[in-house]
Image (cartoon, rainbow, N blue to C red):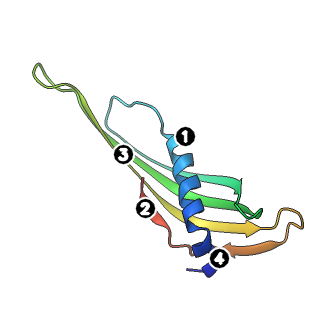
Amino acid sequence: MNKIVEQYQAEIRQQVESAISNWCDWVRNEDIRLEKDLSCEWELTDGMMATVFFTAYYESEYDKGDRYTPPLLSERRSYKVKRVIIYDDETLKEILDTTDVDIEDKV
């Protein structure tokens, strides 16, 4: 992994996980599996800008319960970052453009 991506990895994870939460932040009452390509853009702590393209995965299982047990919803969220672009917003000079980023996690 590129050193500049490692430098911003915590911020990238935080923004991606926030975007995933916004995408699938609703209560499901059925079994479902979703996959969606998403992106997010934000200003990094040092004034640089970042754009991240990733695939988000959502899976839920809904147990309706019965007379003795309440309904139970289990959810799993994960993602795979495909591309990170980091650039200077003032000059629009691209600092990094990588397609082989190894950031994959469960939310």
Q: Mark 4: which amino acid?
A: Ile
Residue picked out by circle 2? 105
* x then y, percent, for residue 46: 74, 64
Q: Name the residue rendered at 59%, 60% in the picture.
A: 11
**Residues under numbered marks 4 and 2 in contact, where contact means CB atoms less than 8 Å apart:** no
Q: What residue type is labelled 2?
A: Asp
Quarter of the figure that contains the N terminus: bottom right
Kindly report which numbered mark, 2 or 3, lies closer to the viewer in this rendering. 2
Residue 97 figure quarter? bottom right
Between disc 2 and disc 3, whose residue precedes? 3
Q: Locate residue 94, reporting x and y percent.
A: 79, 72
Q: Going 58% across and 61% down the picture, which residue do you hit? A: 12
Q: Which residue lies furthest to the top in this view?
A: 67
Q: Tell me if residue 35 comes above or below residue 84 in the rendering.
A: above
Q: State left or right for residue 40 relative to residue 1.
A: right
Question: Which structural element holds mark 4?
Answer: helix
Return the x and y of residue 23 as percentages of the image width and height. 53, 41
Q: Quadrant of residue 101?
A: bottom right
Give the mark nearer the N terminus: 1 vs 4: 4
Q: Residue 59 carries which label?
A: 3
Classify 10 Å Cα crowding around label 2: few (below 14), some (14-19), many (20 and above): few
Determine which of the numbered discs, if any, sits on residue 4 in the image.
4
Q: In this view, does 41 lie above or below 75?
A: below
Secondary element under disc 1, as helix, strand or loop, is helix
Q: Estimate the spatial distance between the alpha carbons at disc 4 and disc 2, rounded to whole Å.
A: 19 Å
In front: label 1 or label 3 = 1
Q: Which mark is residue 22?
A: 1
How far apart marks 2 and 1 lie (CA) works out to: 17 Å
